[in-house]
Image (cartoon, helix red, strand yellow):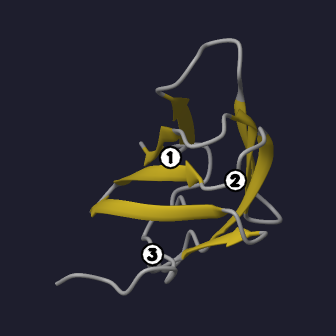
């Protein structure tokens, strides 16, 4: 099913109005496509509902989270697990960045 323009993917909510998110969800991982619709580079923050995405580790010290940035290696992405916020550095104007979150 197609989503109306401007509506965030389930379990994912970008902070700010110029960043859009789409997701591809599997049982143990999600691939996020993040787009910057402005004409300036932006540092993006995305609220991620790990419970809704089934990514919260259930076995203490046996399951972990991994964040992978498929964009430029110098850019950088990080997850604040406790506050459930994904930070993406330097999202270029008019660009799309792929970020993977995985529970393993």
Question: In the structure shown, which secondary structural element does the residue marked by tag 2 occupy?
Answer: loop
As rendered, which of 22 and 95 lies closer to the eye?
Answer: 95
Q: Return the residue at label 1.
A: 63
Numbered label attached to residue 80: none
Please say whether residue 56 is visible from this viewpoint: no
Seen in the picture, residue 28 relative to 65 is either above or below; the reply is below
Q: Quadrant of residue 13?
A: bottom right
Label 2 environment density (alpha carbons within 10 Å; few <14, some 14–19, many ≥20): some
Of the residues under marks 1 and 2, which one precedes in the sequence? Answer: 2
Q: Residue 78's x, y, as percent?
A: 73, 38
Q: Residue 101's x, y, as percent?
A: 49, 46
Question: In the structure shown, which secondary structural element does the residue marked by tag 3 occupy?
Answer: loop
Mark 1 vs mark 3, foreground winner is 3
Of the residues under marks 3 and 2, which one precedes in the sequence? Answer: 3
Label 1 environment density (alpha carbons within 10 Å; few <14, some 14–19, many ≥20): few
Numbered label attached to residue 38: 2
**Which residue reaches farthest top?**
74
Please say whether residue 76 is visible from this viewpoint: yes
Give how far apart the Cα atoms at labels 3 and 2 are. Answer: 19 Å
Query: How many labels, in total?
Result: 3
Label 3 environment density (alpha carbons within 10 Å; few <14, some 14–19, many ≥20): some
Question: In the structure shown, which secondary structural element does the residue marked by tag 1 occupy?
Answer: loop
Q: Return the residue at label 3.
A: 9
Of the residues under marks 1 and 3, which one precedes in the sequence? Answer: 3
Give how far apart the Cα atoms at labels 1 and 2 are. Answer: 37 Å
What residue sits 61% from the left and 56% below the top?
37
As rendered, which of 79 and 6 lies closer to the eye?
Answer: 6
């Amino acid at each position: 099913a197609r989503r109306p323009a401007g509506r965030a993917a389930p379990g994912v909510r970008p902070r700010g109005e110029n960043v859009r998110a789409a997701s591809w969800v599997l049982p143990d991982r999600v691939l996020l496509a993040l787009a910057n619709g402005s004409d300036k580079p932006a540092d993006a923050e995305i609220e991620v509902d790990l419970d809704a995405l089934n990514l919260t580790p259930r076995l203490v010290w046996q399951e972990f989270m991994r964040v992978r940035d498929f964009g430029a290696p110098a850019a950088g992405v990080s997850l604040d697990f406790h506050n459930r916020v994904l930070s993406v550095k330097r999202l270029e104007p008019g660009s799309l960045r792929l970020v993977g979150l995985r529970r393993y």
